[in-house]
Image: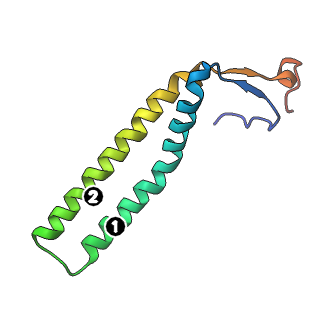
Amino acid sequence: MAAKTEDRNVLVCVPLMASQIEDARGMSRALAEFPTIAWNYADRIHALLSGDASGEAVGQELAQLVHGLRIDAERAHVAALGLRPMVEAAKIVDPKGQEGERPQ
């Protein structure tokens, strides 16, 4: 296990074109929202499968829910792929670390 990093202020610079800022915010929101979206689908699927209903209507609704989940997962995946190069290009400025101040 890696040693725990001291919690200190660092400056992270993510180089973006001005035209990328709103897209980056949107991608970040899409990723942040995805777990809640997935949990909602899971709750609806669980309720559907736990209920007394059965037959073709349940199968159709289940298929629609799974299809919707796949679409939302694809949106989150596209957002992650869009953010990845931005995050990888980030520069970290750590004045305390550069001065040799490390936790003992």
Residue 82 lies, with reference to residue 4, above or below; the image says: above
Q: Which residue is mark 2?
A: 65
Asked where in the image residue 10 lies, by quadrant, the reply is: top right
- Spatial CA distance of label 1 from label 2 is 8 Å
| Amino acid carrying mark 2 in the image | Leu
Secondary structure at numbered mark 1: helix
Residue, far bottom: 52
Give the image location of residue 25, x and y in percent.
Answer: 57, 36
Q: Residue at x 54, y 43 (%)?
A: 29
* Protein image colouring: rainbow
Q: Residue at x 27, y 58 (%)?
A: 65
Between 69 and 6, the one nearer to me in the picture: 69
Q: Which residue is mark 1?
A: 44
Give the image location of residue 48, x and y in percent.
Answer: 27, 71
Residue, far front: 19
| Quadrant containing the N terminus in the rendered view | top right
Name the side, left or right, on which 4 lies relative to 84: right
Kindly indicate whether the residue at mark 2 contacts the one at mark 1 (C-beta within 8 angstroms).
Answer: yes
Give the image location of residue 37, x and y in percent.
Answer: 43, 55
Q: Which mark is residue 96?
A: none
Instruction: Classify 10 Å Cα crowding around label 1: few (below 14), some (14-19), many (20 and above).
Output: some
Instruction: Classify 10 Å Cα crowding around label 2: few (below 14), some (14-19), many (20 and above).
Output: some
Secondary structure at numbered mark 2: helix
